[in-house]
Image (cartoon, rainbow, N blue to C red):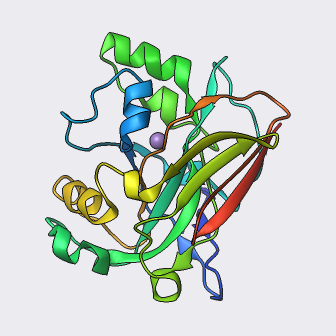
Amino acid sequence: MDLFEVPKPALDVAGVQGRFPVHRIYCVGRNYAAHAREMGNDPAREPPFYFMKPADAVVPGGGRVTYPPRTADLHHEIELVVAIGRRGADIPAATALEHVFGYAVGIDLTRRDLQADAKQHGRPWDTGKSFEQAAPVSRIHAAAAIGHPGTGRIWLTVNGELRQEGDLADMIWNVAEAIAELSTYFTLAPGDLLFTGTPAGVGAVARGDRLHGGVEGVDEIEIILA
Ligand code: MN
């Protein structure tokens, strides 16, 4: 018997009764050249790197999100999210897509001021990236239903105004490559999510803002900051 009740975060799956239990949330940093440039980095010289958010940071389906404490610069990052369905380590890129259960749309909410301070001092990113409700994610669509999107528009509006726009084809490391590299560090398992990076146009949002984003061929997500 467990001593306490703890959250068991899970995501809905389109057209399926059962839910997708969230095990770990991995995120790729700087995976679109234009976003790497806007953050002051050279996109050509860096292999993919990763950070994590706790599983219970997920906000299933979006909706109301509380503006987090200790920041004056909360940023949106719209991202394609990969849902892992098969265990594996040292996965070759050539077979990496066989480990994908499906895809969703997520927003990597970021306390940019805390992240910038961490970078400046060579400290971990956790306070900037891994807070409560930092990972709103849409329902998942099985790859068996929608395939593996390698191209398609990715976008985000704030209060109806377009802020981020790109194409999945602009990813520096595609989904298969991002999975392959990640699996050299960690054993991937069913229930893992991988945020695959954001296109250019990140920026600050405020209480009361309505964020609406999507990935062509996958889904859309909407959150309201309260
Ligand atoms: Mn991100």
Does 189 sit above or below residue 7?
below
Does 123 sit above or below residue 19?
above
Q: Is residue 2 visible?
A: no
Q: Measured from the top left, where is residue 2 in percent x and y?
A: 54, 63
- For the C terminus, the image quarter is top right
Q: Measured from the top left, where is residue 101 in percent x and y?
A: 43, 78
The residue lying at 63 percent from left, 20 percent from top is: 73
Q: Measured from the top left, where is residue 197 in percent x and y?
A: 43, 47
Name the image quarter holding residue 35.
top left
Name the image quarter holding residue 86.
bottom left
Does 106 sit above or below residue 123?
below
Residue 164 or residue 20, whichever sits in front: 164
- For the N terminus, the image quarter is bottom right
Number of marks in the rendered image: 0
In the shown orientation, is residue 63 left or right of residue 122? right
Q: Is residue 222 visible?
A: yes
